[in-house]
Amino acid sequence: MNRKILGLALPNIITNITVPLLGMVDMAIVGHLSSTHIGAITIGTSIFNLIYWNFGFLRMGTSGFTAQAYGANRWDEAVKTLIRACSIALSIAVTLLALQWPISLIVPIIFEGSSEVMRLALTYFFVRIWAAPATLGLYAIKGWFIGMQDSKTPMWIAIFLNCVNIVASLLFVLVLHWDIAGVALGTVLANYSGLALGLIFLRKRLKTPNIQSILNNPRNLIKESLHWQEMRRFFKVNGDIFLRTICLSAVFTFITAASGRISDEVLAIDALLLQFFTLFSYIMDGFAYAAEALVGRYIGSRQKRHLKLAVRLVLIWGLILTVFFTILYALFSNQFLHIFTSDNALIAAAGKYMFWVLAIPVCGFAAFLFDGIFVGATASRTMRNAMFVATAAFFLVYFGLKYIDINFIGRLTDHGWNNNLWTAFMVFLILRGLLQAIRVRKDIYSQAQ
């Protein structure tokens, strides 16, 4: 079982390391321009996190349904899941392109920053929004391949996509001097390049013998895939994931917005600190994606013993990674900060918050792994409810500490306000993992009876 977990997890880890590279490369490029550019790229990235995270069900729901179809040897259902996901992805992307101007008007209401920061952030937004069809299409394709127990194909797509992004962004910014618009354009070009490669791999996979025969009547297949009765369960599960992701987006958007309200310096500091969270989360998600594939597979094939073993071993691997990252961040956090910016004053200011960087792995590992376990089981209701409670706790803790500080302690420094924000964030992470952990027996193991 460990071999199966690592066989799925390691390619996913490589894939997920390349995912934050999109943001990290952008941050590293603009970080050497000015702190204003750091704030702008943070807000610009947060805009798309707010948009795209809400449609993360295109990957997660697709992965869970496909894995269960794979375990039950229902190749027709696996193909229908792909068709549904791609159709919804295209519809959402066209809607986003049509609504880009109204969306831009909402940005200054949600985020705060200097006029120059906001101008640069919107410049980034209006260029990168044109990557929506490719980005959402890749969500669906990636989820389908993971559900089909194939994590290597998404890995190659991600590596290729990020190589294009790095080369294009460096060319557009450092050679052509297109500033932040060049960074956004590099991301657009990279996403469409990745989509093109994904379609090539997809065409090859659909030609395998167990799937090829299903495609003899494509019109009828598409009609059956998009039939309301067939779509109903897909929308039910993905509706729960959608609501869950809205809460996730709300928390991260609030963190960026609250940081900006404290000061431009705190906005830049928290942007740097969140890179540590991003790196850890995407590597941990490599094992979460392995859990999605294996949990869905063993539920589909009704192998309860294998299901329980997979869950237990994934959690053990998560603990090992938690220890590793805590030590890594303790020893090399300063070196990581120098990758993202050459502003020594900013690095020194960020050093006051290194405790929170060390707390990230300990507080967050369970949340990531249980997300993968519950996605594979399509147990979306528990995921949604756990996120509702954790999100409510985040805001209660933050505003509760704010009330106490104002009424009983007095005016806090920027450092104090930001510590309140990070305290609430850690509570949020802990509750997500804890609330799902207590439901594993009832919501996961019971499905393999």
Image (spheres, rainbow, N blue to C red):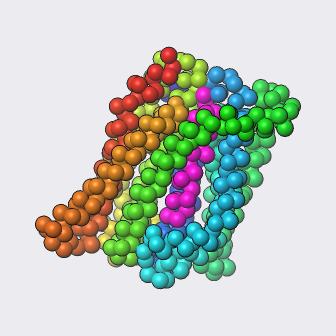
Q: Is residue 100 visible?
A: yes
Q: Is residue 359 magenta?
A: no
Kindly identify the residue that appears in the image at 62 percent across and 24 percent down. Answer: 71
The answer to whether residue 366 is above or below residue 208 is below
Q: Quadrant location of residue 239?
A: top right
Residue 447, position as x, y percentages in the image: 50, 22
Q: Is residue 67 magenta?
A: yes
User: Vertically, is 430 above or below 110?
Assistant: above
Query: x, y (%) of residue 358?
Result: 31, 53
**Residue that sits furthest to the front in the current view:** 228
Main secondary structure type of the part rendered in magenta: helix
> Seen in the image, is 376 located left or right of residue 203?
left
Q: At 48% across and 68% down in the image, what residue appears?
A: 42
Does residue 82 show up?
A: no
Q: Which residue shows up at 31% across the image and 71% down it?
A: 349
Picture quarter containing residue 188?
Answer: bottom right
Residue at the left extreme, as displayed: 408
**Which segment did they paint magenta?**
46-68
